[in-house]
Image (cartoon, rainbow, N blue to C red):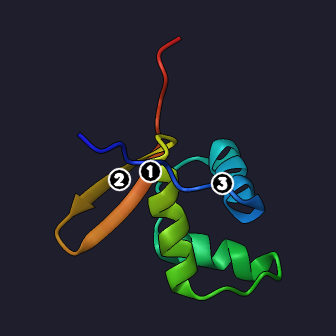
Amino acid sequence: MPVTLAPPLNARRLRLLDVIRHISGEWTTLRAHRLYRGAGWGPKRSTARRDLNALARSGYLVQHETYGRRFFTLKRTSA
């Protein structure tokens, strides 16, 4: 069975993860995009979408889908 590697966590993804850890809640592409724009990074919405998906594939976030809506939450670890 082939092994799927997690995408690399660049500085932008690490910053997004740090903010999600501190603010928590539901994170949509729009919310992540607004964070990026507010920080002056200015990437496209597709960049925010890819970053959220990468954090989910890396095991940091959980993806949720409801009718017409996708969002991510921080994955809780048992202590």
Cα–Cα span, label 2 and label 3: 18 Å
**Where is 76 relative to 25, above or below?**
above
**Callout count:** 3
User: Which percent across, then down, holds residue 66?
Assistant: 21, 62
In the rendered image, the vertical position of residue 38 relative to residue 27, given as above or below? below
From mark 3 to mark 1, how far is it between C-alphas? 11 Å
Between marks 3 and 1 in the image, the one whose residue lies nearer the viewer: 3
The mark that comes first in sequence, 2 or 3, is 3
Q: x%, y% of residue 55?
A: 52, 53
Does residue 61 appear to the left or right of 65 in the view shown?
right
* Percent coordinates x, y for residue 59 in the rendering: 46, 40
The residue singled out by tag 2 in the image is 63
Residue type highlighted by circle 2: Gln
Q: CA distance from mark 1 to mark 2?
A: 7 Å
Query: SS class of the residue under badge 1?
Result: helix
Q: Residue at x 59, y 88 (%)?
A: 44
Please tell me which residue is depicted at 56% across the width and 74% down the height of the picture. 48
Q: From the image, tell me which residue sits under label 1.
A: 56
Q: Residue at x 53, y 11 (%)?
A: 79
Q: Identify the residue at the far front of this view.
A: 1
Q: Classify mark 1: residues with Cα within 10 Å, few (<14), some (14-19) or many (20+).
A: some
The numbered dot on residue 9 is 3
Q: Nearer the viewer, mark 2 or mark 3?
A: 3
Residue 48 in the image: above or below residue 40:
above
SS class of the residue under badge 2?
strand
Q: Which residue: 49% across, 58% down?
A: 54
The answer to the question of whether label 3 and label 1 lie on touching residues, with beta carbons closer than 8 A, is no
